[in-house]
Amino acid sequence: MALNGIISTSLTGLTASQEALRVTSDNIANVNTPNYARQAVRQQAVLAGGKSNGVDIQAIERVVDRFLERAALSSTSDADRAEIMNLLHDRLQAALGRPDSGSNLSARMNTLFESLGSLALNPADAVTRQQFLGDLGAYTKEISRIASVIQELRGDASTEIEARLPEINDTIREIFDLNAKVIQQTVLSGEPGAAENQRAAALDRLARNLDIRLINNDDGSVDVVTTTGILLVSRSAYAKLSYSAPGQADAATDFPPIEVRRINPISGAETGTARELDGEIRSGTLRGLLDMRDKELVDVSLALGELAARVADQINGVHNANVAFPPPNQLTGNVVGLASTAPHRFTGIAEFAVVDQAGTLVAKTSYDFDANPGATIADVVAAVNAGLGGAATLSYSAGVMQFTAANATDGVVIAQDPTTPSDRAGRGFAHFFG
């Protein structure tokens, strides 16, 4: 071998070693860089005339496990979904108050029923009555406050969705541009590692907001789709997400969907029709925000409404099981939505009476529902009116029961039979219609 050949062969080894040292130093410098993957030099022998003629750098490759990389993206999406939901849950818990607090909803409800018990024992005492009304007002205000906080949290979740979309769209466009850079560097230098690391960091940021799946192409680029198959990035186009938060939310707010549109990278114009994305997102912060806005907080709101309705029903039950003194001239119920021809479906006995201002009985009748199981509401009304002989009129119109004394100075009373009280679905006659 000529001297020049020996020197040339040696220089290829020095050049390859120098490049390997450069890559190693780059790996060391980026040891704490997030999403940086170690690079490795792949060498190959140089042959000339069937003989070895030194060494060459075939490629500089990122050392990654594709399976673990994809699993990491999935874990990132799940973790960020849980994190954003936890933040909203913490705010909700703060609104509900500490369990041992004397001013939370549970404590106010206990205080309310204690006041109601005291009122039942001493109904004539003005201070006791005033205390009950004050406790009732505090309880209802707390219900209203929590209901407002729930809707505020739903509105905040909606606003946060809108606030995150610019970053998501910028990241999608960045991945598209980095795909082109990876392809270019692969062709020109065989060293796309830097661009691939940048792309990996962008993919991680995107995965924090929604679940994604990668499709690796032969040229080094990746197609990015949601786990349900909605295309976000390809070699020829990318997607853009849009959402407009409706502002202040209430129980009747109809939130618009997140929409995804395909963008022509050359013109920047939208192509095709928009698709709704809400149902296609399985994880990430967007899924967490959607779940809190449309499910978790809605369920809490419904539970709060159910609690308030049951407490109100219990208080109404106590109220309707007793008689005011002096009794009012007229009792008007709530809309129950039943036709007058509907069967009454009560059991037991209800009593109807008219008294004067001194409490002296003017007229009285009772209705035995068990004795008339097939009677309609209209039949009950007719029987009661006949029994009172004109001293008062029971009427039922548009789903509302009304009981009115004929004499403006008299009062009307609906009471339960002490032995066999009337009942329909756990409510007495006055409670059911009142």
Image (spheres, rainbow, N blue to C red):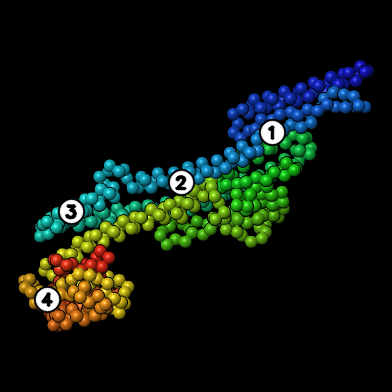
The N terminus sits in image quarter? top right
Q: Earlier in the sequence, mark 2 or mark 3?
A: 2
Viewer-closest of 342 and 133: 342
In the image, farthest residue toward the top: 3
Q: Nearer the viewer, mark 1 or mark 4?
A: 4
Residue 235's disc is none
Kindly report the distance in space between the C-alpha atoms of the residues bearing marks 1 and 2: 35 Å
Vertical comparison of 317 with 139: above or below: below
Vertical comparison of 24 with 376: above or below: above
The x, y position of residue 69, in whole percent, is: 62, 38
Q: Which residue is mark 1?
A: 62
Q: Which residue is mark 3?
A: 115
Q: Which residue is mark 2?
A: 85
Kindly report the distance in space between the C-alpha atoms of the residues bearing marks 2 and 4: 61 Å
Give residue 388's quadrant in the image. Answer: bottom left
Kindly report the distance in space between the C-alpha atoms of the residues bearing marks 1 and 3: 72 Å
Q: Earlier in the sequence, mark 1 or mark 4?
A: 1
